[in-house]
Image (cartoon, grey):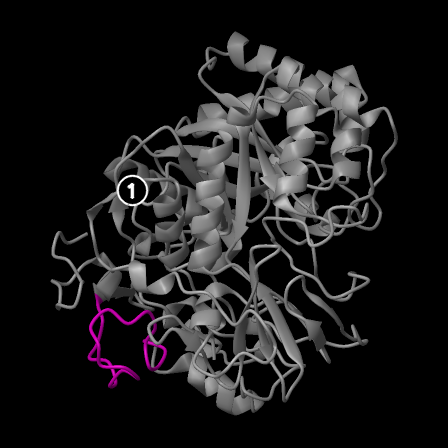
């Protein structure tokens, strides 16, 4: 990164001003760009996709118009957003995040403009290796999982020579063979096993090796499970012999990739329903603690006592009560990533709401969610809050046919419908580079395309609303992310994390650092102008969030 600031002045070219050549996979300077929508240096998004306007071609092909579309996916590429990472001093609080191995893909780089082939096209090499304290790559699965990703896991087990109950990466090409968007110059073959080691891997795992070489202090964690790959946990954790197989396989992965210093177990959810087909019962919490204890012993026996065990946990009080969190900490868990997002979403949410709000809209309602409610439950349960990290979302949760009755606290209705709700690649979920491109003009201090930004002052949460189309978007903004960082400091939590790093261009990461009280040592963008609130009432005058 350049040490030249961007506070109102041009800066020297940096890694953020490069793209990956779609033939060689190498980083090359960006070609001359079309005039920006705003000529002010440091704008957050490009006027057009740097890859020959690929995103705009998709918009035209599908007739996508952000001002009116409510039932279409946009397929906006992450290339639309400029990388704007600042660098910050360290203190007692950590910033970490999840990075997905599937975010690298985009068929448009190979000339395939079908919607099915469209992808994010995130270049891992554009991530500043100093932007986060900890990077959690996801996801590995468990062989024998009979859930949504059963076939994917079974194919990967063959590629990686894994057997039932063993942990396995699930995309042999993307994890160890790919070159584009991973920092490598070209294809080296399809033989997986010789590449299944840190010194030789390409793909996301090889790219992480390159990032780690640039910043050896960057902690790397491997996430196992997740929403679509948690089905196997229940049976495996209930059996001592199967736990032993799993733990030995994790040790093997660490021998192959010693750069990892943490295993992040993401069982969604012990003792509670998760994805369709997942089995659960009241024994899960105790069995989970046994799994953690066995893994801790296996790591110590293998000479990797340095490897920490963390978990991702639901922020629902009902789910936390079943998960045996105090028992997990006693068994060896060092940190809890509390998934304080997805409180709302379509079509599952019964009423309009916020998806990652800091405070309750109704403290007396048992069926409501908030970060503060979850943290207070953990405090009362005796969980050391310094081991708790709360999440912020680099994506929105959307709803169609929304009618807003009140801003603070939010009240209204929506219709989930049977089809797609506008999002980027997933129905009802708009990723942050898409938010910046089409819905929120941070530089101008307002929303885009007829949307209005509102702030619920009771929940300390922001949302976008288009009164003509009825599209509602609950989202984090730099203001709310900074507020979460300040909450971490006030309450003595361990830090913040994001789902996901690859959905953010750095603007939310910067806000997180500043909320955590960390000062910029290298400044690429002045964040102070991005911390504005939206309208606080429905009849507020124009100019406040619109």
Closer-to-camera residue (196/377) = 377
Closer-to-camera residue (180/314) = 314
Relative height, residue 4 to residue 418 (above, below): above
Q: Where is residue 171 shown, x and y percent of the image?
A: 56, 49
Is residue 25 visible to us here?
A: no
Q: Where is residue 301 shown, x and y percent of the image?
A: 53, 8
Closer-to-camera residue (273/362) = 362
- Residue furthest to the right in view is 281
Q: Residues within 10 Å of mark 1 (few under 14, many from 20)?
A: some
Closer-to-camera residue (436/105) = 436
Q: Where is residue 240 shown, x and y percent of the image?
A: 77, 15
Does 222 lie within the magenta span? no
Q: Where is residue 329 shown, x and y percent of the image?
A: 63, 19
Q: Main secondary structure of the magenta part?
A: loop
Q: Residue at x 43, y 71 (%)?
A: 436
465 vs 280, left or right, is: left
464 vs 197, left or right, is: right
Highlighted magenta segment, given as a residue range: 29-50
Is residue 308 visible to us here?
A: yes
- In which quadrant of the rendered view does residue 342 lie? bottom right
- Residue furthest to the top in view is 301
Relative height, residue 274 to residue 342 (above, below): above
Q: Residue at x 41, y 51 (%)?
A: 189
308 vs 219, left or right, is: right
Relative height, residue 40 to residue 485 (above, below): below
Relative height, residue 298 to residue 513 (above, below): above
Which residue, given by chain and number where applicable, does mark 1 sit on?
Answer: 130
Judged from the image, the secondary structure of the residue bearing numbered disc 1 is loop
Q: Residue at x 75, y 29 (%)?
A: 323
């Amino acid at each position: 990164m350049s040490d030249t600031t961007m506070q109102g002045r041009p800066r020297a070219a940096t890694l953020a001003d490069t793209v990956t050549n779609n033939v060689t996979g190498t980083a090359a300077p960006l070609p001359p760009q079309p005039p920006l929508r705003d000529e002010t240096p440091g704008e957050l998004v490009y006027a057009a996709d740097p890859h020959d306007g690929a995103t705009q071609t998709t918009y035209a092909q599908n007739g996508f118009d952000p001002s009116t579309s409510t039932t279409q996916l946009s397929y906006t590429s992450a290339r639309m957003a400029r990388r704007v990472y600042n660098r910050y001093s360290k203190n007692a609080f950590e910033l970490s995040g999840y990075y997905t191995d599937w975010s690298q893909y985009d068929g448009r780089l190979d000339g395939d403009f079908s919607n099915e082939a469209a992808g994010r096209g995130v270049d891992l090499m554009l991530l500043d290796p100093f932007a986060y304290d900890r990077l959690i790559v996801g996801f590995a699965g468990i062989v024998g999982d009979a859930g949504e990703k059963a076939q994917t896991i079974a194919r990967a087990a063959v590629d990686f020579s894994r057997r039932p109950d063993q942990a396995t990466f699930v995309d042999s090409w993307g994890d160890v063979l790919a070159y584009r968007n991973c920092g490598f110059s070209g294809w080296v073959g399809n033989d997986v096993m010789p590449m299944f080691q840190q010194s030789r891997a390409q793909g996301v795992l090889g790219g992480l090796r390159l990032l780690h070489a640039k910043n050896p202090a960057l902690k790397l964690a491997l996430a196992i499970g997740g929403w679509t790959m948690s089905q196997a946990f229940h049976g495996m954790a209930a059996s001592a012999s199967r736990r032993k197989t799993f733990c030995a396989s994790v040790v093997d992965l660490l021998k192959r990739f010693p750069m990892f210093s943490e295993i992040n177990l993401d069982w969604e959810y012990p003792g509670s329903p998760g994805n369709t087909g997942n089995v659960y019962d009241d024994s899960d919490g105790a069995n989970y603690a046994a799994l953690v204890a066995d893994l801790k012993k296996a790591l110590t026996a293998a000479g990797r006592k340095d490897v920490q065990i963390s978990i991702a946990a639901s922020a629902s009080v009902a789910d936390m009560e079943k998960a045996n969190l105090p028992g997990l900490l006693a068994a060896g868990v060092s940190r809890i990533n509390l998934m304080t997002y997805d409180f709302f979403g379509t079509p599952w949410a019964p009423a309009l709401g916020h998806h990652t709000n800091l405070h309750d809209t109704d403290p007396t309602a048992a069926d409501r969610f908030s970060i503060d409610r979850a943290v207070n439950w953990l405090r009362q349960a005796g969980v050391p809050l310094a081991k708790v990290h709360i999440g912020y979302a680099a994506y929105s949760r959307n709803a169609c046919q929304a009618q807003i009755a009140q801003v603070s606290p939010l009240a209204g209705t929506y219709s989930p419908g049977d089809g797609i709700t506008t999002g980027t690649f997933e129905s009802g979920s708009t990723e942050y580079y898409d938010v910046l491109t089409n819905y929120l003009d941070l530089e101008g201090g307002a929303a885009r395309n007829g949307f209005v930004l509102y702030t619920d002052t009771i929940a300390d949460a922001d949302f976008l609303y288009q009164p003509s189309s009825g599209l509602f978007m609950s989202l984090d903004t730099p203001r709310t992310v900074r507020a979460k960082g300040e909450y971490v400091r006030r309450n003595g939590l361990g830090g913040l994390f994001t789902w996901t790093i690859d959905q953010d261009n750095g603007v939310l990461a910067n806000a997180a650092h500043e909320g955590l009280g960390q000062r910029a040592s290298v400044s690429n963008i002045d964040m102070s102008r991005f911390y504005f609130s939206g309208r606080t009432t429905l009849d507020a005058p124009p100019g406040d969030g619109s």
